[in-house]
Image: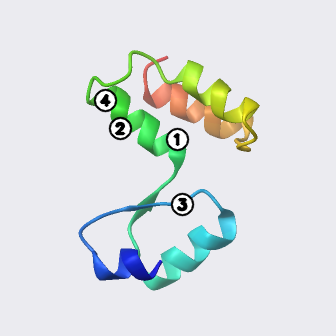
């Protein structure tokens, strides 16, 4: 978080709910791993995010069905 405070024009990648609350309180711009995937797809770096969301879930990243569906919808999948 201290690094993110030092570079306010950049976004921190934060998935943990408590850390996100802290970042919000400190005014740190952020996005989660799902947001990174969505950004990569929008920039043409990934053809699909669905496969990567599944890989992350299998690796242990908890993503609710609602978040997965929202990310897929935003990605047009």
Residue 27 visible at all:
no
Q: Residue at x 27, y 23 (%)?
A: 44
Q: Report crowding for label 1: few under 14, some 14 to 19, many 20 or more residues within 10 A (C-alpha).
A: many
Q: Which residue is mark 4?
A: 42
Secondary element under disc 3, as helix, strand or loop, is loop
Measured in 3D between alpha carbons, the distance from the residue under mark 4 to the one under mark 1, in whole angstroms, is 12 Å
**Which label belongs to residue 34?**
1
Left or right: residue 8 versus residue 56 is left
Q: In the picture shown, does residue 14 fall above or below 45? A: below
Q: Residue at x 39, y 15 (%)?
A: 47
Q: Position of residue 37 (x, y in %)?
A: 45, 35
Q: Which residue is mark 2?
A: 39
Q: Earlier in the sequence, mark 4 or mark 3?
A: 3
Q: Report crowding for label 3: few under 14, some 14 to 19, many 20 or more residues within 10 A (C-alpha).
A: some
Q: In the picture shown, does residue 21 fall above or below 46? A: below
Residue 40 visible at all:
yes
**Picture colour scheme:** rainbow
Q: Earlier in the sequence, mark 4 or mark 1?
A: 1
Q: Residue 66: name its quadrant.
A: top right
Measured in 3D between alpha carbons, the distance from the residue under mark 4 to the one under mark 3, in whole angstroms, is 20 Å
**Circles 1 and 3: CB atoms closer than 8 Å:** no
Q: Earlier in the sequence, mark 1 or mark 3?
A: 3
Q: In the picture shown, does residue 15 fall above or below 64? A: below
Q: Which residue is mark 3?
A: 14
Secondary element under disc 4, as helix, strand or loop, is helix
């Amino acid at each position: 978080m201290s690094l993110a405070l030092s570079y306010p024009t950049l976004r921190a990648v934060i998935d943990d709910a408590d850390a996100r609350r802290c970042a919000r309180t400190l005014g740190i711009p952020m996005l989660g791993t799902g947001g990174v995937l969505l950004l990569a797809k929008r920039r043409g770096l990934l053809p699909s995010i669905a496969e990567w969301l599944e890989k992350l879930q299998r690796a242990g990243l908890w993503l609710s069905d609602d978040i997965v569906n929202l990310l897929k919808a935003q990605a047009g999948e």
